[in-house]
Image (cartoon, grey):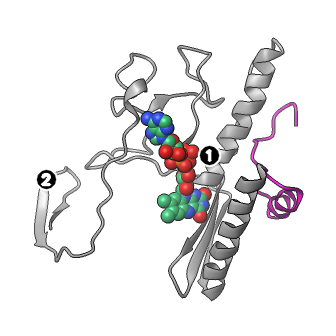
Amino acid sequence: MIVEKINGDGSVKTEKDLLFAFSMMLPTFRGIKPVSGIEGLSSPRGFTVMDKHPQNPKDRNIFAVGVGVAIPPMGPTPVPCGVPNTDVKIESMVTATAHNIGALVRGQGPDRVGSWKAVCLADFGNGGIAFVSQPQIPPRNVNWSSSGKWGHLAKYGFEKNFLRKLRKGQSQPCYENLALKTLGIDKLKQTTHG
Ligand SMILES: Cc1cc2nc3c(=O)[nH]c(=O)nc-3n(C[C@H](O)[C@H](O)[C@H](O)COP(=O)(O)OP(=O)(O)OC[C@H]3O[C@@H](n4cnc5c(N)ncnc54)[C@H](O)[C@@H]3O)c2cc1C
């Protein structure tokens, strides 16, 4: 594999040959075809455009959540870079969306906004890392990370818990609610409605 190191203006600084065996490359993220190329609905890469509610500004019946939403870049980069998305942040978008669709059905306007907090566990085999970023996009109130064998055990426990929830059709059992509340990881930003 030939990799290029680039300068700030996007020009190639150096090239390097790397051994390519059992390697993995992540291709650029894109939205899906059914919502791509529609003026006002999708970005040039096919991500769905939404506001903070997260509702499409042009077609108010469309909400978008997850890795498929268009999040504006933090600033200019030499090559196009997306803003990372994580599951807890997405759950906060989903929570806001569910409340806001409910409000629309009741004839009110959408007023809930996801907190976009990130909690991540990465398993490295014998160990692992965890980090908390609140909110995920700076400026942040909380920046915390730690690593150790417990990281591996925590991800193992998380997977067991996650699969159990899927089997039972539960989204957030009371013990999880309590744990997130203790850590101060709420899914919604405080609004006039709490
Ligand atoms: C190894 C790994 C570890 C991670 N660890 C963490 C972590 O510790 N904490 C954290 O917060 N986040 C973590 N993430 C990120 C998190 O998993 C993702 O951000 C999250 O799952 C994205 O959710 P989503 O619903 O937007 O997309 P997905 O979970 O990818 O769901 C999209 C679904 O759409 C389906 N689909 C795709 N195309 C079509 C189509 N044309 N028609 C119908 N269905 C379609 C797919 O099959 C899929 O089921 C991790 C991700 C990975 C890969």
Residue 71 highlighted magenta (yes or no): no
Residue 181 highlighted magenta (yes or no): yes
Badge 2: residue crowd in 10 Å (few <14, some 14–19, many ≥20) = few
Q: Is residue 154 visible?
A: yes
Mark 2 residue element? loop
- The residue to which callout 1 is attached is 90
Farthest front residue?
A: 167
**Magenta-highlighted residues:** 170-194
- Residue at the image point whose x is 78% and y is 53% from the top: 168
Mark 1 residue element? helix
- Residue at the image point whose x is 80% and y is 52% from the top: 172
Q: Which mark is residue 11?
A: 2
- Residue at the image point whose x is 73% and y is 24% from the top: 101
Identified by mark 1, the residue type is Ile
- Residue at the image point whose x is 74% and y is 61% from the top: 164
**Quick check: 55 above or below 72?**
above
**Quick check: 146 above or below 105?**
below
Task: Kindly report which numbered mark, 1 or 2, lies closer to the viewer in this rendering.
Answer: 1
Q: Position of residue 15 (x, y in %)?
A: 10, 67
The one of 91 and 160 positioned closer to us in this rendering? 160
